[in-house]
Amino acid sequence: MGDRFTVHLSDLAATRALAARLAPALRPGDAVLLEGPLGAGKSEFARALLRAATGDPALEVPSPSFTLVQHYDLPQGAGTIWHFDLYRLRGPEELAELGWEEARQGIVLVEWPDRLGPLAPEGALRVALAPGAGEEERVATLSGWPAERLRRVLAS
């Protein structure tokens, strides 16, 4: 499945910093799939990424657990990021009514991407988060993008 990069995140600030480094690398048509068990930090990663992408550190980012999708306009007409939380979805057949096709014109950020089934975008960046040894520690495994693109994100 290509190159994988593992990043050890010592605390919540490190998790947020990784998300903030990823934000400027995103382009319309990109998909970021956040994987991991409950409590792994997917929602916190998503909030940090959205705040960095919009340039608004105080941006209110409610979890879309119940609404299933929220969208955020990027500055200077750079497009839209659609934040999906698919935990409550039964399967990919329910995506059409959430505006999935329209969202794919922008950037999609998806929690619980296993619910996408065959609609999972090819070439998506997968960010798998797992608990680390300490309470706030996490391990992030990034894959799906070309190695050079991932190296640029991790080097920034």
Image (cartoon, grey):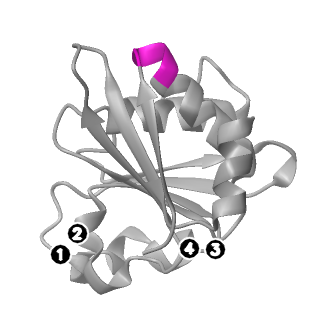
Q: Are marks 1 and 2 in contact (CB under 8 Å)?
A: yes
Q: Which stretch did the figure color magenta? A: 10-14
Q: Nearer the viewer, residue 90 or 23?
A: 23
Instruction: Say whether disc 1 or disc 2 marks the residue closer to the N-terminus.
Output: 1
Instruction: Say whether disc 3 or disc 2 marks the residue closer to the N-terminus.
Output: 3
**Residue 104 disc label:** 4
Q: Are marks 3 and 1 in contact (CB under 8 Å)?
A: no
Residue type beneath disc 3: Gln
**Residue 105 disc label:** 3
Q: Looking at the image, can residue 133 be seen?
A: yes
Instruction: Pick the quarter of the image with the N terminus.
Output: bottom left
- What residue is shown with label 2? 115
Mark 3 neighbour class, 10 Å CA radius: few under 14, some 14 to 19, many 20 or more: some
Q: Nearer the viewer, residue 55 or 36?
A: 36
Q: Are marks 3 and 4 in contact (CB under 8 Å)?
A: yes
Residue 12 as seen in the image, left or right of residue 68:
right
Mark 1 neighbour class, 10 Å CA radius: few under 14, some 14 to 19, many 20 or more: some
The residues bearing labels 3 and 4 have C-alpha atoms spaced at a distance of: 4 Å
Q: What is the secondary structure assignment of the residue under circle 2?
A: helix
Instruction: Pick the quarter of the image with the C terminus.
Output: top right
Query: Which secondary structure dominates the residues rendered in magenta?
Result: helix
The residues bearing labels 2 and 4 have C-alpha atoms spaced at a distance of: 16 Å
Mark 4 neighbour class, 10 Å CA radius: few under 14, some 14 to 19, many 20 or more: some
Residue type beneath disc 4: Arg
**Residue 91 disc label:** 1
